Image: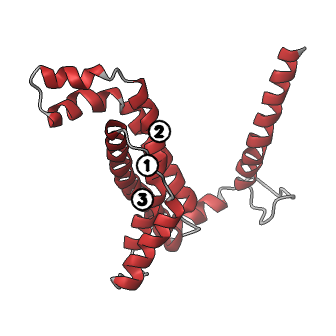
């Protein structure tokens, strides 16, 4: 009975998560302006989406912002995770406070225009980097700690060891952090 109950709960959670997405997908192929009444099958919403210049610019801007900030967040989060892991010092993280502080510093103190992508990229990078950090640290903990030391003992430089030993070991964490950063940036674009 316990096994059946677990599968029932999992099924209910999946239904709760995916039915709204399925409903939106169905309604996206209708000409109805509101959810609730389906008049006929149509690609009108998609034609409007891909032929309206303002919407195309918004999509391109969103994707460019997401990828750019995710690349920067991945670099910062990965280097931060590696540095924190090998320094063995505890670090705290207040990402929202840091993100707002960086935005205020750029816009108010240095006078960077609010109408450019620079504050957005920096804000999204600062907000996404901790998630990359959290994706990379478990991979570092799973890695054999003697690999780094053995490479150094065998004459490898720290840079060579980082690129050829550590990064391949934690690559899956880096990729998952990048994907998470892109997703977070796309999710936060309208908020920004």
Give the side of residue 55 with respect to residue 169, left or right: right
The C terminus: image quadrant: bottom right
Label 1, secondary structure: give it.
loop
Looking at the rendered structure, which numbered label has been put on residue 140?
none
Q: Residues within 10 Å of mark 2 (few under 14, many from 20)?
A: many
Say above or below: 56 vs 84. below
- C-beta proximity under 8 Å, tags 3 and 1: no
Instruction: Read off the residue under disc 2.
Output: 135
- C-beta proximity under 8 Å, tags 2 and 3: no
User: Residue 114: x percent and y percent?
Assistant: 43, 81
Q: CA gap, disc 3 to disc 1?
A: 18 Å
Label 3, secondary structure: give it.
helix
Can see residue 56? no
User: Residue 166: x percent and y percent?
Assistant: 28, 30
Say above or below: 21 vs 107. above
Residue at image coords 44%, 57%: 66
- Front of the two marks 3 and 1: 1
């Amino acid at each position: 009975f316990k096994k059946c109950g677990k599968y029932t709960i999992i099924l209910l959670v999946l239904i709760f998560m995916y039915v709204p997405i399925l409903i939106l997908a169905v309604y996206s192929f209708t000409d109805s302006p509101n959810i609730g009444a389906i008049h006929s099958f149509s690609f009108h919403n998609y034609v409007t989406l891909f032929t309206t210049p303002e919407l195309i610019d918004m999509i391109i801007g969103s994707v460019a912002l997401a990828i750019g900030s995710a690349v920067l967040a991945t670099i910062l989060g990965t280097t931060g995770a590696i540095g924190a892991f090998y320094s063995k010092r505890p670090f705290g993280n207040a990402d929202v406070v840091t993100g707002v502080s960086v935005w205020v510093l750029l816009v108010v103190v240095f006078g960077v225009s609010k109408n450019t992508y620079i504050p957005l990229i920096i804000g999204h990078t600062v907000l996404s980097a901790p998630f990359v950090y959290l994706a990379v640290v478990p991979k570092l903990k799973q890695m054999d700690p003697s690999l780094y030391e053995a490479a150094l003992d065998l004459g490898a430089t720290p840079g060579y060891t980082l690129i050829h030993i550590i990064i391949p070991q934690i690559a899956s964490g880096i990729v998952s952090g990048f994907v998470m950063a892109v997703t977070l940036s796309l999710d936060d674009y309208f908020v920004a």
